[in-house]
Image: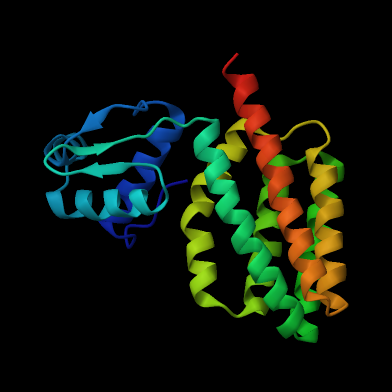
Amino acid sequence: MAEPLSTPAYARLRDRLRADILGGAWAPGTHRTLGALAAEHGVSMSPVREALLALEGEGLVEIRQHRGAVVPVLDAKLFADLYDLRGALQSLLARRAAERATAPQLDAMAMHEAAYAAAAEAGDAAAALAANEAFHDALEDAADNPQATALYKARSAFVNAVRLRLGFGQARMAEAAAQHRAILAAIAARQPEAAAAAAFAHAMAAKRDLIARLEEGNR
């Protein structure tokens, strides 16, 4: 889908570079200078810098002084580290949601939890990813901790793009649906520690599944 012309130049470039990285066109370990990227994409240096800073925030590139940017190796260690961070943040957000969620916020989480379960039953990975993001968005809204949410969101686009490319293990979507139900039940019951534990278990299960899919693809 074409992006609207009102989208800032750096955002359009960021999305193209992200697609290049995840699609393999910009290979791990490869350096590209700001000048080369600007010439390749027909833009000035300013949007290149902004795009690279955004991608560095997602963990997709590392900016090197006087050398432009390099794509890190997308290996099991990188995803294990990312999911350890996601697990800690999801646990915190679920704990706060159990303390703070309003009735309408609980209804929103329940709606998205049901949508995920339906997508999982249909085996629709794209719909499941969208419903999963909506469920967590609703949970984050209930948690009302913008700083933790910003940290969590900084890596979400990267992880979701990789997940969409690699797919899910045979039983993962059904497992995640059950985990969503457990998280929601603990939040609705006002049990912060149970909600935190359920959210952490959810993240660790996702980590194991994604790493398994990555390793299968590398065989």
Quarter of the rendering containing residue 68: top left
- Residue at left offset 39%, top offset 34%: 21
Looking at the image, what colour scheme do you see?
A: rainbow
Q: Position of residue 171 (x, y in %)?
A: 83, 36
In the image, residue 195 sits, relative to residue 57, either above or below, namely below
Identified at 11% across, 39% down, the residue is 35
Counting from the top left corner in percent of width and height, residue 199 is at: 73, 60
Tell whether 5 sits left or right of 85. Answer: left
Q: Which one is in front, 110 or 83?
A: 83
Task: Tell me if residue 185 comes above or below residue 104 in the rendering.
Answer: above
Residue positioned 77% across, 83% down in the render = 104
Residue sitting at 60 percent across and 80 percent down? Answer: 144
Q: In the displayed structure, does residue 66 sit left or right of residue 84? A: left
| Residue 127 visible in the displayed image | no
Residue 214 position (above or below residue 95): above
In the image, is 167 to the left or to the right of 198?
Answer: left
* Residue 207 visible, this angle: yes
Where residue 113 appears, as percent x and y from the top left, is 80, 61
Where's residue 177, x and y in %?
Answer: 83, 52
Look at the picture and state if 51 lies above or below 148: above
- Check the picture and name the quadrant holding the C terminus: top right
User: Closest to the observer: 85 or 43?
Assistant: 85
**What is the tally of numbered marks visible in this picture?**
0
